Image (cartoon, grey):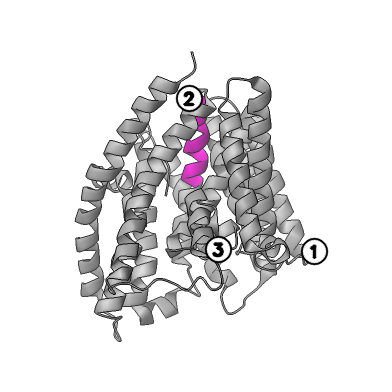
Amino acid sequence: MTVSRAGPSRLGWLDALRGIAALVVVFDHSSYTFMADFRRELMPQFNTSRYGIMVFFLVSGYIIPASLERRGCVRTFWIGRIFRVYPLWAAVVTVFLAANLLGIAEMRDFGQQSAAGVAVAHVTMLQELLGTPNLLLVLWTLSYEMSFYFLVVALFTVRLHRQTAAVAVIMAVLAAVSVMAGVALPTSALSGLAGTGPLIAVSSIAMGVAICCASARSPVLRGFGGVLGGVLALVLVLFNGTVPLWEGLVILAVMFLGTAVYRAENGQSTWRCAASTAVMVIACAVASAYRYGDDDHFTRRGWILAFLLAVVTFGAALLSRRRRIPRILTALGTISYSIYLVHPVLLAVIDCTIGRRRQDSLALEVAFFGVLLPLCLLTHRYVEAPSQAWGRRLARRLRPP
């Protein structure tokens, strides 16, 4: 995922959470290849994918607003985000496309969509919300991360950023109301109505305008850009997601719950407010999932258990934040973004060349991690770390006086 590196003394618990979440997500995806039978038995009881990404979203909710408010400048915030997220993303996508050309990895079919449209949608990182299949499955969460960035910037530019607990509750309540009322929009509803190509064009232009204006010196332009980006993100999440409407709202509520915890931790709000927000978000999320029921692609028991354990994991880490965190966990957290993006490429190559196992093999599962983690150490050292350093230097140079 895309949270910034946390300091080992003060925010090491967030690194630990990212490390744990990354390992669980990798297991979820690699189990298709190495432990398919075990996975089929586990998923109805515990959705490992949702556990990992909910932990990631809670951490993002905590750290992203802190990053913006610490800088106090939208321009440097976006510079930091771009240099944090895009360089490794570009490297991984390039390697995957090269592997596809060499015939050692298979790329999914994009149907009638043009190559230019698919490329633009992915460059915005909103492809999941623009009706475009993800080049790599894991990229879907980055679309919600990007939407969260826009919403955070919007609240900051109109000086409502301290009201994030209320935003979390509103999102959670809307999720519950939508599923109780039986509101079920078609997948990518806006794309079906307006066409995927036009939606990509309009959204990418709006995104560029929003970032540029929100980064301007003029207060009027900053406000306009912030609101434009926030409206774009909200419209896409509500009306063009591929997950059910209630789950898209829950994802936003979970991230703003992380922000509510950050505010309580830093004295900007009370712990009572954070606890009340958590109770509302949890109650609405569980009620929504339970009401939604079971289908071929969703098992409410597995989702609810994963969601509750993700919240419990975040809470346990929060309570342990002043204790010494094992170095291995903070190290895993440091390279978690590499782990998250690199593992699907490695799996795609394995599936295309060796093939998936017919019988479960724990030894091969462990061996996969043994290959993946050293590779991610290299991508972090030679791609992530240098690009973040460049971003910091550029942010200092372009910071308004």
* Disc 3: which residue: 132
Residue at (65% x, 21% y) in the render? 219
Provide residue 218's location: percent of width, then percent of height: 63, 20
Measure how far apart labels 1 and 3 are at the Cα level. 28 Å
Please give the range of residues in magenta.
Answer: 58-71
Q: In this view, does 356 lie above or below 312?
A: below
Residue 311 at least partly seen: no
How many numbered discs, if any?
A: 3
Image x and y of residue 305, in percent = 52, 64
| Residue 222 quadrant | top right
N-terminal-most mark, 1 or 2: 2
Q: Mark 2 points at which residue?
A: 70
Q: Secondary structure beneath disc 3?
A: loop
> Gap between marks 1 and 2, in whole Å?
40 Å
Residue that appears at 52% across and 66% down? 133
**Residue appearing at x 47%, y 24% in the figure:** 71
Viewer-nearest of discs 1 and 3: 3
Between 310 and 394, which is closer to the camera in this rendering? 394
Q: Is residue 291 left or right of residue 74?
A: right
> Within 10 Å of the Cα at label 3, are there few (<14), some (14-19), or many (20+) other Cα atoms?
many
Q: What residue type is labelled 2?
A: Arg
Q: In which quarter of the image is residue 36?
A: bottom left
Q: Which of marks 1 and 2 is in front?
A: 2
Instruction: Judge left or right: residue 2 versus residue 91.
Output: right
Identify the residue position indicated by label 1 in the image: 181
Main secondary-structure element of the magenta-colored stretch: helix
Left or right of residue 124, residue 333 in this image: left
In the foreground, 88 or 331: 88
